[in-house]
Structure formats: C-alpha cells, structure tokens
Amino acid sequence: MAEASGAQGRTPLLEVKNLKKHFPIRKGILSRVSGHVYAVDGVSFQIGHGETLGLVGESGCGKSTVGKAVLKLIDPTAGEVYLKGKKISDLGQLEIRPYRRDMQVIFQDPYSSLNPRMSAGEIVGEPMYNYGLAFGKEKEEKTRQLFARVGLRAEHMLKYPHEFSGGQRQRLGIARALAVNPSLIIGDEPVSALDVSVQAQVINLMMDLQQEFKLSYLFVAHDLAVVEHISHRVAVMYLGKIVEMTDKRTLFTSPQHPYTEALLSAVPIPSPKMKRKRIILTGDVPSPIRPPPGCRFHTRCPYVMDHCKVAEPPMQEVEPGHLVACHLRQPGQALAAAAASNPALTAPAH
Amino acid sequence: MTQAQTMERPGQTVGGVEKVLEIEDLKTHFFTRDGVVRAVDGVSYHVLKGETLGVVGESGCGKSVTALSVLRLIAKPGRIVQGKIKISGRNLLELSEEEMRSIRGNDISMIFQEPMTSLNPVLTLGRQIAETIMLHQGLSKKDAWDKSVEMLKLVRIPEAERRVHEYPFQMSGGMRQRVMIAMALSCNPKVLLADEPTTALDVTIQAQILHLMLELKEKLGTAIVLITHDLGVVAETCQRIVVMYAGKKVEEATADELFERPLHPYTVGLMKSIPRLDRAATTEHPGRLMEIPGMVPSLKNMPPGCAFAPRCSFATERCRREVPAFEMKASGHYSACFNSDKVAEIYHG
C-alpha cells in the first residue's frame, strides 16, 4: 500500500507522545490512595494516513488502555495526543466532540456495545443524528447504504441486536463506526470473540473498508497472526511500555527484542511438519502495580544481564524505522543473528 | 511424535496399542421447548493409550458436549439418546450413577477453559486437591495432603508447600490451569479430557501449559483428548485429529496427513481462513483470507443432506439431498464428503 508510509513526511494522522495512565488504588474508609496500577507508562507512536498500526501484547499489558486514553474515554495521567496535528489531549468534553467524530471505536464484545432496545437501523443511524450529519430520509438512505457496504441486508435494519449472530453484530459495530466518516478507527480486539471462519470475514471487511475509505486503524489485539495479517506496522507492548515497533515484515522476520522473539515463538503454527526453536518463558507477567525496576522484562528474559535489573533500556532506533528498547541492541546494530534464529523461518530441524 | 497409526476397527487394540476410550455412534440431544437440538449426532472416535487426540471445530459443533457425555455430565433437557462409551472395554452408559462416580476422576478427568470457575473460591488449593485424592484413592488426610504438594510440584508451581495453603484468587490464570491439571492428574486417570485448556491464556502461558501437558503425558502415560478451535494448537500437540461440524464428525486423520492433504471442504476452509504467521515472511502484503460464507446452521433445523452444503463451494445437488457417509478415503484418512477427490485436487493445485 502506497499510503502506508504516511508516518514519515506529512503530519501523521495520529501522534501519541509519552502517554501515561496510572490508575490509583484506593484503600480504607477514607479511600486513601495506597498505590497505582501503572497500566500505560510512557507510550509514544504515530499512525499515518491509511495506515494500520497493530498493538499487541498479553493481557494486562495496557494495550486496551492506550486505545481508551487516545479516545479520551479515560483521562490520561500524562502525555499528549495529536490528531491531524491538533493537540486534543487537553481539550474539554465539549471541545473534543468534533474530534471524537473523527475517531471511532469497535469493541471486542459486539453484544455489550450495542443497545439491546434499539433496532439495528437506529444503532447505525444515531451517530449521524448526534453529529448533525444527516436526518430523516437522508439518514435512512445512508444507513441503508452502510448496511449494504458491511454485508448486512436492508431488512436487518428493523431487527434487534439479540437477533444477530456474533459476526453480524460486529458488522453492525463497524457500520456504526463508519456512519460518521471517521479517519481513524480504534479496534479493541474486534475479532477475538468470533469463530475462525467468521473472523476471516470481518478481517477481510475491515481491510476492504480501509482501501475504500482511506481509513487508519489502531488495531489492538493479542492474536499475533491476525495482527500480522492486517497491520502495516506493529508495536509490541509489555507491562505498560512499547518494547519494539517496526514495520510488520521486519518484526515478524527479524524481531530484535527478546520478548517479541519469545512471543512469536510461542504462537502455535498450524503445520505439524514445522519444527521450531520454541522459547518458553518462565513465570508470569509481573503485576503492573509494582513493575520490576530496570527493564520490565528482566524477570522473564532468557538473556538477562545484571545491567538490565537496574537500568531501564531507552527506546532506540536500531534500523531506520525500527525501534527497540533493549540493552542488547544498539543503534545501527540490529542483531544479524536474529534473522537466522527467526522462529517462523527455521526449517524442519529433526 | 509417533508415526501414523493404522486404524483397523473393531477390536480393543490398534497396532498393539490399547484403545483406552472408545466412543461409538454417540447421540446427545437437547429436548428444548423450541425443538430437539442435535448437539452430538452420531459421533465415534477413540483414543489410544498415551496418545493425544485433537478434536477441532467451531463453537456449537458438539465437541464439548461429546466430552461431557463421556463423563455423563449432561444436564436436562439434554440426554444421551444413543451410543456406547467404552473405557477399557466397559460401557459407561450401562453403569449406575454410583459406579460412574468412581470412573470420574479415577479413569477419566477433565479440565476446562476457565480454571477460575472450576475451582472452589472458598477452599484452599490443598483442600481441593486432597479431597479428590481422599475420595478416589482412599488415602488418609495426611497422605492426601502430601500428595497434593507433590502434584503441585509436578506441575511446577513454585513454593508448592506454601502455595498449597493459598486460595484460587491468589493465583494467575496460568497457575490456576496448572492447579486444575494437578487435580485432574492426581488419581492417574487413563484419559484426560482437556476442553479448550489454553484458550483463556496468553500465548506465552499457553506455550508453558501445552508443554507441561505433553511432558506429563509422557511421564504418566495418560491419553489426552484435546478439544480446541485452534488449529495451531492441535498441529503442535496431537498425533491424530478429528474435525467436527454441526454435531458430526467430518474428517479424521493423523495430524501430518490432515494438514498435508485435507479432504473435507470445511477443514480446508478452516485452514485457509486463519492468518498464518509462518507465511508472514514470504508475502509482502497478504491477500484476502479465504472466507467460509454464512454461518453455522442452527442445530434445531438442520438442512437435509450434508450440513455443510449451504456454505460449501463444492456442493452439488446430491450434497443437498443425501448425507455423505463417513468413509475411508486413504489409508487412515476418513472424511464425510462426496467431493473429497476434488477437494484434494484443488487444495494442492
């Protein structure tokens, strides 16, 4: 895709700088703050026009919180968010409304994000009314077009959410997001709840719509294969921080961060003949309430050095456009061996 | 991995290996007010001693209900209406409820997708595991408690002596699944039914748990029936695979054979509709994923003929009229499709 290179050059569609979200933990009858959950702790990225940035990580790494903080559905603790060059992170509830129209969201569970008392047609038409984009007959006509575009029939407009299957509900969620002509859609695990055969339908639809409407996506998901398929660039998160970010091809063929490497090697490949070097990480993800000092991954890292336990590795550009936060990697010194040890490429070993 | 097993039927052994669990023509139906739901409609499969069998399918295909039927845990309005479930030759469907209780846990154990809901939140882990052991193996409280600690160590829970006094909420998802495995294996069952055991877990934890299950299988010789929707998981762990669709078995083969040469259009559809990480390196920009059009039919009013016909690109008039028989298409490779030859051709072409 030609427009995918938008991150450099032009103003990016979305720019996030050092975003933080710390949730206070309150205890006792006075609700004194006894600590914080460092859900997102300094995340920066850009999304170009027509580009998809995949945000992957395991549960609790803060990937969904990033999505919500960008939309200001929750107030970020610190950091800046720019949409088309305009700083939106310090706007008030009213001032942000026009920008909200430009950023829509699709949720994981399509059922709980659709009002059960509204018909499908009303659900998709409502945002147009809210933003004063279309009324009456015009709204209905637009709704009809949207239904056709996402693969629903016109008679579905009169049905209620419970009458739809999971895949159809997700199509409804997509139609609702498209109703206000956004430039950016944030998908928070939009296909995770769907069956494999239906998942493919929704992924294809999202990719088609991107081409047609020049949409940008922030695609938050835990399924690496899905993220690989749909994204142009991918950011890997671990305990509130991005540990690696680059174009998807580089990430999946020569991962530079030990966590990315382990994550990729852990994904089961549907081919019994493919024998891979499997890196099995020990232990669980530490609690984001007390993240480990130094590099947050050091408690599970197979290459851990003493230095990692005290000093936090800075995010460095090891290759143009390839950012990694690891003490083992220096700028211009991407690990050549990584390509050779790429888990997905290793030929049958035994 | 062992090499392809030949599957002569009938009989107790296959290639000298004992069939520990045999399901024959099982039908489990749910008699709801809106009609009969044929959740499992004539399913047969077996597991050999020490083998890992994968049962694959999407939600509602009957893979879990089959497993629950094996343990006779089908609640009303459901009922096993037909079939045999044999464990070492004994038909479980003829046993009394009392006898069945001694089978559960002792001969067959089960682990579920969500370990939190299968553990009792108000009892310590030790008590829950010890309870199983005391009940099934008749050990004293002291011995059962010691065995619990031993089991926790076996599933590699760090500081097992301390952890045995903890409650489920104090553990992470991966830890809880380890506890479930410890509990399930505590009485040395012949068969472990694992229903989506890693679906709720993160991939790095999933890798740990699958690795652990296979290691324990080697050590204890337990046969595993791994029920999942994830083709990657079965490809990496199972020797033989059964694919189910709408309450029926549609294909069965060794793992190598199935992934190499799928013969049922549904299996092909499943394989082609998932994005593949191992192909990431070879393509600049991926094309569209193959879609299986439509959705799983309602089990209440199944179409006549092949249940997959309405979604199948190979379907002919015959498919919509006649139910294809489940038959052997190649050595050890079974499929229920009239067009298996064409499917194989196209998959390779």
Image (cartoon, coloured by chain):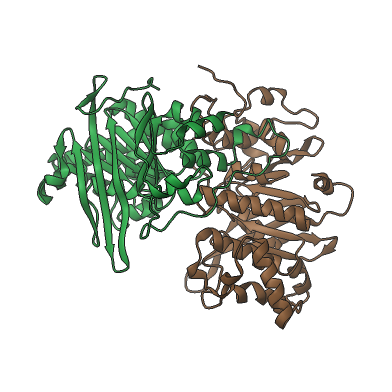
Chain colours: A brown, B green
Count of all numbered marks drawn on residues in the image: 0
Residue A246 picture quarter: top right
Residue A129, above or below A204 = below
- Residue in front for this viewpoint, A294 or B38: B38
* Residue A308 picture quarter: top right
**Looking at the image, which is closer to me, A231 or A100?**
A231
Q: What is the x, y in percent for residue B18?
A: 22, 26
Q: Please identify the residue farthest to the right as the structure is shown.
A: A9
Q: Is residue A77 visible?
A: no
Residue A44 or residue B76, whichever sits in front: B76
Residue A135 visible in the picture: yes
- Furthest toward the front, the residue is B317
> What residue is rendered at 76% in x and 72% in y?
A96
Identify the residue at image location x=75%, y=29%: A334
Identify which residue, A237 or B27, lies in the foreground.
B27
- Quadrant where the image shows the N terminus of chain A: top right
As drawn, is A115 to the left or to the right of A241? left
How far from the left and from the top, in percent, is residue A183? 77, 61
In the figure, is residue B100 to the left or right of A165?
left
Q: Residue at x 60, y 46 (%)?
A: A57
Residue A114: x, y in percent? 56, 70
Q: Give the percent coordinates (x, y) of residue A343.
A: 59, 28
Q: Farthest residue toward the bottom?
A: A136
Lateral position of residue A32 relative to residue B307, left or right: right
Residue at screen point 59% across, 43% down: B290
